[in-house]
Image (cartoon, rainbow, N blue to C red):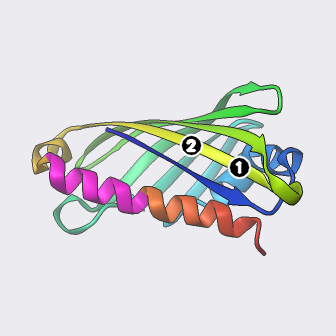
């Protein structure tokens, strides 16, 4: 599955990049985190509650910030599993200057799901993933509005 979009934050690009490059700040905006174990400067183990109805459950994830390219792009990877299946996620964030010191964030999220949850049907999985990504994107944007 692939999801993409863009949004603007009223913060300069170096501030946005610093936030997305900090594993503690990234984990702070992920919804329904049950626990966090920081491994190093760019990675953490998480237990996250995600999904809805029959495909709801806890996932043990390894979250890593990878491939930081100058001050224009960052990739965040997550890989893990839970009782209902497995998840591989690659999120790419590209940053560009916008008007009045704001930053335009263009994002692309690729998700691969396996196990029991993969048998639920693409429509249910897509709707669930889209809702979760929307919540995550809004949490990220709100972090700059506080």
Residue 4 seen anywhere in this rendered image of the structure: yes
Q: Position of residue 134 (x, y in %)?
A: 46, 61
At x 73%, y 46%, the residue is 20
Location of the N terminus (image quadrant): top left
Q: Which mark is residue 104?
A: 1
Residue 123 magenta: yes
Q: Position of residue 60 (x, y in %)?
A: 43, 47
Looking at the picture, does residue 49 appear above or below residue 18?
below
In this rendering, the label closer to the viewer, 2 or 1: 1
Dominant SS of magenta comes to helix
User: Which segment is the magenta one?
Assistant: 122-132
Residue 82 magenta: no
Nearer the observer, 20 or 54: 20
Quarter occupied by residue 35:
bottom right
Quarter occupied by residue 67:
top right
How crowded pointer 2 is (Cα within 10 Å; few <14, some 14-19, many 20+) is rated as: some
At x 78%, y 75%, the residue is 146
Nearer the observer, 78 or 2: 2
Looking at the picture, does residue 23 appear above or below residue 72?
below
Residue ID for mark 2: 107
């Amino acid at each position: 599955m692939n999801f993409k979009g863009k949004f603007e934050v009223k913060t300069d690009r170096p501030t946005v990049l610093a936030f997305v490059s900090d594993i503690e700040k990234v984990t702070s905006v992920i919804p329904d985190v049950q626990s966090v174990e920081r491994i190093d400067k760019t990675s953490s183990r998480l237990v996250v509650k995600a999904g809805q109805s029959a495909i709801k459950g806890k996932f043990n994830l390894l979250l890593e910030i990878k491939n930081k390219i100058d001050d224009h792009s960052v990739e965040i990877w997550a890989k893990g599993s839970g009782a209902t299946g497995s998840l591989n996620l690659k999120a790419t964030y590209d940053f560009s200057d916008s008007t009045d010191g704001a930053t335009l964030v263009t994002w692309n999220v690729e998700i691969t799901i396996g196990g029991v949850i993969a048998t639920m049907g693409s429509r249910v999985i897509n709707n669930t993933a889209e809702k979760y990504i929307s919540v995550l994107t809004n949490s990220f944007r709100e972090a700059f509005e506080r």
